[in-house]
Amino acid sequence: MHLGKVSKVICIIPARDEEGGIERALTGLLSGSGLSQSDFIVVNNASKDKTPEIVKKMGILSLDCPEIGYGNACLVAIRWIETSQRNPKYILFCDADGSDDPADIQKLVRVIEETGADMILGSRTLGIVEEGALSPIQIFGNALTCFLILFFFWRKFTDMGPLRIIRYSSLHRLKMEDPTWGWNIEMHVKALQLKMDIREISVNYRKRFAGVSKISGTLSMSIRVGIKILYTFFRLLVFRVHS
């Protein structure tokens, strides 16, 4: 599914120290996602390796974010979009490690177009997960977060995965601000509070092509991320977002 020169979609890919696999990951996305080269923005999140050089060599826009943090990287890309003349219909978020199946991007775009939803989440739980691609602590963390959403919002979800697509207009309403690992849960909770139309579809998930996950690579980091996600969730319950 080719989206044309003036794309409806911009795909934001935060990347930190991914030189071992980012060329392979981006090559797969270019050939299998249905998006064109100009539809991707890779944000170099304080990499100490050759990640940005590889991205630029491939002819893909590379933005620099010197402050470490997934949310910081996403905010840099969003600010760039706001000051550009692109004005996309949808914003898609994807990982730089090759774990996402490029074909699922086509599916996300198709479903949000057909349903008119505000946001479509890619659920790895509903799809096929390569053995070892998700650590036990990731599986537990996802289950806990989904339980909290069910308990407080009476909405059933199966995953808090990073692969997702949202209407650009809806993203503006969320007033996103989390600089680090609370980004995805902030997006989810705020969208629920604003009663947006959120849907899940199955996506596949693979082992990263190279390197170690910045989140689940160590037990201490996994614990820090888990605490931040829980803090963000309960903070948003108290300080609700307003349209």
Image (cartoon, helix red, strand yellow):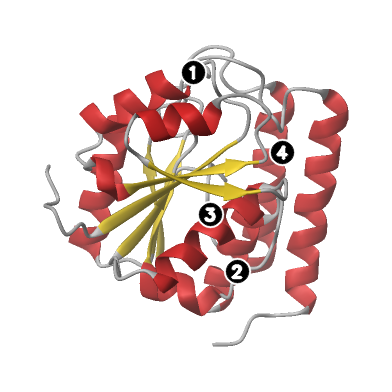
Q: Give the Cα separation between the discs numbered 1 and 3.
A: 34 Å
Please name the residue shown 27% across and 47% down the image. Answer: 38
Q: Name the mark on residue 141.
A: 4
Q: Nearer the viewer, mark 3 or mark 2?
A: 2
Q: Give the Cα separation between the discs numbered 4 and 2.
A: 22 Å
Residue 236 vs residue 100, the one in the foreground:
100
Q: Nearer the viewer, mark 3 or mark 4?
A: 4
Residue 80 pos. (x, y %): 46, 64
In this rendering, does residue 101 appear at all?
no
The quadrant of the picture occupied by the N terminus is top left
> In the figure, 134 relative to 203: above or below?
above
- Classify 10 Å Cα crowding around label 3: few (below 14), some (14-19), many (20 and above): few
Q: Give the Cα separation between the discs numbered 3 and 2.
A: 23 Å
Residue 98 vs residue 236, the one in the foreground:
98
Residue 160 pos. (x, y %): 57, 46
Mark 1 in CB contact with mark 2 (< 8 angstroms): no
Q: Amino acid at mark 3?
A: Lys
Q: Give the Cα separation between the discs numbered 4 and 1.
A: 26 Å
Q: Nearer the viewer, mark 1 or mark 2?
A: 1
Q: Which residue matches tag 1?
A: 21
Q: Is residue 114 left or right of residue 180?
A: left
Q: Which residue matches tag 2?
A: 176
Q: Earlier in the sequence, mark 1 or mark 2?
A: 1
